Amino acid sequence: MLKELVIASHNQGKIIEIKNILSPFDVKIYSADELQLPDVKETGSTFAENATLKAETLSSLSGKACLADDSGLCVDALDGRPGIYSARYAPNRNFNIAMSKLIDELQASGSTDWSAHFSCVIALKTPHTPTRIYEGRINGKITPNRRGNNGFGYDPIFIPDGFDKTFAELSPEEKSTVSHRGRALKLFLDSEFNGRNL
């Protein structure tokens, strides 16, 4: 069973979110920063390709099991943008700029349908085993007014279906039960450990 797991990310918000979800399990978790591992360039054309690339690269470099994800916000009226380019909408990880750009594009589109979804693909690579993939998705809509101080990324402008709050207004516990990453991680836990302690 896994005793150590590297999270292939330098995004502190994402690392904290994954650590919280995995906290009931007895596993030592490392961030890429802690092990001085590089940021892997996302050269794939899908979330799955990017997650796989990161997991396989950092597992090879660290010699440990590695969990990587690629996730993004896909907006219907923008033909699925920003999608795999969600992080690249944010120069120097400044998501205030990214959110402003997204709202400007939606307003310029003239569409009144601001439906969107978050998608997350998780890749798990352990030494000497094939990479395994898990995908989670949450539908919702974009709001032009930023609300809430929790979460990270586009959370202040995304309202998940069934809620009247943005992701950034939900507690971490509430968000993890419905978020795209929470759903992908649940599939990962159910499949890999079937209720067993890591």
Image: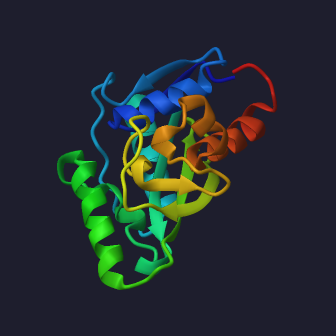
Instruction: Please state, as top left, top right, bottom left or bottom right, where the C terminus lies in the image.
Output: top right
In this rendering, is residue 191 above or below 6? below
Q: What's the residue at 68%, 41% (across, down)?
A: 188
In the displayed structure image, the side of residue 162 where residue 38 appears, left or right: left
Q: Nearer the viewer, residue 128 or 23?
A: 23
Q: What's the residue at 28%, 43% (across, down)?
A: 39
In the displayed structure image, the side of residue 39 where residue 186 appears, left or right: right
View extreme (bottom): residue: 110
In the displayed structure image, the side of residue 2 where residue 194 appears, left or right: right
Q: Nearer the viewer, residue 112 or 167?
A: 112
Indicate the position of residue 138 as horizontal and vertical percent values: 61, 56
User: Is any part of residue 178 visible from this angle?
Assistant: yes
In the displayed structure image, the side of residue 8 where residue 178 appears, left or right: right
- Residue 135 lies in quadrant: bottom right
User: Is any part of residue 49 visible from this angle?
Assistant: no
Indicate the position of residue 102 as horizontal and vertical percent values: 32, 66
In this rendering, is residue 125 above or below 45? above
Indicate the position of residue 195 as horizontal and vertical percent values: 81, 27
View extreme (left): residue: 92
Q: What's the residue at 66%, 19% (across, down)?
A: 25
